[in-house]
Image (cartoon, rainbow, N blue to C red):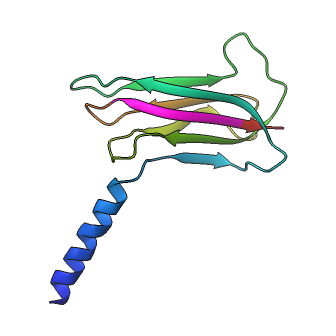
Amino acid sequence: MLKLRLTALTALACLAATSYAISSTWGNISNSAQLLHAEQVFNASSPEKYVNREIKFPKNGVGNGRIITGIRAFDQVTNGTGGHATIYSGGPGFNFVTLQLQSQYNYGLMFHVEIYGK
């Protein structure tokens, strides 16, 4: 009976985990931090492929005199088929960042990215 209950609880926990989006936050976003950049990212699915999108701040050829204090990448897909975000270079403590967004296999991307700094 205990084994059945544990199996049921494990299945329920897995179901609950897949109903949430996979969002990421890096650094510290204090009340005094300013929003330096916000971007909506949408890429449709591609059959039998991953969808990748690179976000660079600041854009090529544009300077940034502020230090990044925090980054949020909100996955807008809440049914367990969303993607994930990874910092490839820079980030909090630097004045630049390169983020890589990647979908799950056979799915697209829908993210809202925010970059804060001082």
Q: Residue furthest top?
A: 61
Taking 20 as reference, is 101 above or below it?
above
Residue 110 among those drawn in magenta:
yes
Quadrant of the image occupied by residue 63: top right
**What residue is at 54 percent from the left and 46 percent from the top?**
24
Query: Is 14 or 68 nearer to us in this picture?
Result: 14
Residue 6 in the image, given as x and y percentages of width and height: 23, 80
Residue bounds of the magenta highlight: 108-115
In the picture provided, is 46 more to the left or to the right than 65? Answer: left
**What residue is at 46 percent from the left and 39 percent from the top?**
76
Number of numbered discs present? 0
Residue 111 in the image, given as x and y percentages of width and height: 49, 34
Which image quarter holds the C terminus? top right
Query: Is 52 or 113 nearer to us in this picture?
Result: 113
In the picture provided, is 1 more to the left or to the right than 6? Answer: left
Taking 61 as reference, is 69 above or below it?
below
Residue 16 in the image, given as x and y percentages of width and height: 34, 62
In the picture provided, is 57 more to the left or to the right than 21? Answer: right
Quadrant of the image occupied by residue 68: top right
